[in-house]
Image (tube, helix red, strand yellow):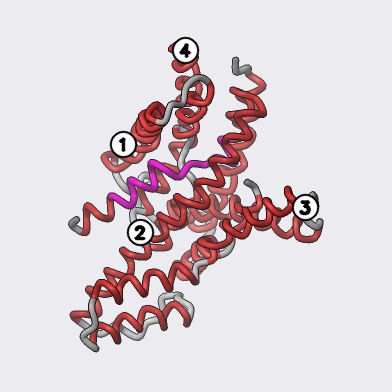
């Protein structure tokens, strides 16, 4: 059973995130330290580089957009920061081992799939825009390689090529250049070789990964604070989308996981762990990617900030209910 000491450990793991969030909020709202362009640069750094530190630990357009956001809300969880201490308190080291494995699945499957959907949406929107008017010569922060890839789509359109195949080619080229896609694969390959050949990561490399991991978590919450400070209201998305985000995270995700787990024959503690990990609060990376691609960042920031606050009593409620039902 969970004791007060276990709950304190979970709170200790969450509290530093909100310190970074408040610093980010204050740096824009009160101290005016960053401009809009600098805030965009911080988020781009997170979306392309800082999130890589995680590998070391292990229809209509509107409906399509919301499908991507709902997918992100239901699948991406904060397994390392919240999941590990929660599972340690509830199920011991066995629960922690399962959560770490699920974190690898999330990194290798769900995050690349989310990026694929976001790139497809972004490229399709660019395709529809360039088909009606030429793109303005404005530098929006894209590197030259990305600009060349997107311009290839414009050339294909003007040359009368098939839209679907040109769209698919551009999406896959941009995915191939995204370090988030292959970094987790390299991390898994390294872990497998290290386990097989019985060697450890050199301290100089381990220190480099560790500092990127800490930078990614802290700067991501700092970036959420900046984003909230730039909005007119703290809950910028309104009541309806906020409720949708929290229900997707804490009800829809666990329900789908429970049905799929029962369908494949899971039972006992393994089933309980599968359901509880699906109710772990929203991953910070989901906001980073949503903000980078301009898709419902206000909904995702609210899900991260307020979902993490209310997650502990909800997780304890899931734990007690599952133990009682067993």
User: Disc 4 or disc 3, which is closer to the eye?
Assistant: 3
Dot 4 falls on a residue whose secondary structure is: loop
Find residue 172 and name its label. none
Q: Spatial distance from mark 2 to mark 4, Cα to Cα?
A: 39 Å
Graded by Cα atoms within 10 Å as few (under 14), some (14 to 19) or many (20 or more), the crowding at tag 1 reads some
Read off the residue under disc 2.
117
- Disc 4 designates what residue? 326
- Give me the C-alpha separation between circle 2 and circle 3: 37 Å
Q: Earlier in the sequence, mark 1 or mark 4?
A: 1
Which image quarter: residue 294?
bottom left
Secondary structure under badge 3? helix
| CB under 8 Å between discs 1 and 3 | no
The reply to whether residue 256 is in sight is yes
Provide the residue designation for mark 1: 243
Comes first in the chain, label 2 or label 3: 2
- Residue 279 image point, x, y percent: 45, 32
Q: Is residue 313 magenta?
A: no
Q: Secondary structure at mark 1?
A: helix
**Whole-Å distance between the Cαs marked 4 and 3?**
42 Å
Between the C-alphas of marks 1 and 3, the distance is 49 Å
Classify residue 134 as left or right of residue 274.
left
| Residue 197, numbered label | 3
């Amino acid at each position: 059973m969970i004791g007060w000491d276990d709950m304190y450990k979970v709170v200790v793991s969450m509290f530093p995130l909100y310190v970074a969030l408040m610093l980010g909020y204050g740096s824009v709202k009160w101290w005016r330290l960053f401009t809009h362009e600098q805030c965009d640069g911080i988020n781009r750094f997170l979306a392309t580089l800082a999130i890589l530190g995680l590998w070391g630990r292990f229809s209509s357009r509107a409906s399509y957009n919301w499908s991507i956001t709902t997918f992100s809300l239901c699948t991406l969880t904060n397994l390392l920061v919240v999941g590990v201490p929660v599972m340690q308190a509830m199920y011991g080291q066995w629960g922690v081992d399962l959560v770490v494995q699920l974190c690898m699945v999330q990194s290798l499957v769900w995050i690349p799939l989310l990026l694929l959907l976001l790139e497809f949406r972004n490229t399709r929107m660019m395709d529809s825009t360039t088909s009606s008017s030429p793109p303005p010569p404005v530098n929006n922060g894209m590197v030259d390689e990305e600009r060349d890839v997107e311009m290839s789509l414009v050339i294909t359109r003007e040359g009368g090529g098939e839209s679907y195949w040109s769209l698919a080619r551009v999406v896959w080229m941009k995915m191939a250049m995204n370090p988030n896609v292959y970094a987790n694969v390299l991390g898994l390959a390294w872990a497998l070789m290290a386990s097989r050949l019985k060697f450890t990561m050199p301290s100089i490399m381990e220190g480099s990964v560790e500092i990127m991991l800490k930078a990614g978590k802290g700067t991501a919450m700092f970036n959420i604070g900046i984003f909230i400070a730039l909005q007119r209201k703290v809950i910028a998305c309104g009541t309806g989308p906020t409720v949708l985000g929290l229900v997707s995270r804490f009800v829809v995700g666990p329900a789908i996981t429970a049905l799929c787990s029962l369908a494949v024959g899971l039972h006992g503690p393994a089933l309980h762990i599968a359901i509880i990990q699906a109710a772990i609060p929203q991953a910070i990376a989901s906001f980073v990617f949503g903000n980078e691609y301009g898709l419902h960042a206000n909904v995702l920031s609210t899900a991260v900030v307020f979902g993490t606050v209310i997650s502990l009593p909800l997780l304890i409620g899931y734990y007690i209910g599952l133990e009682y039902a067993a």
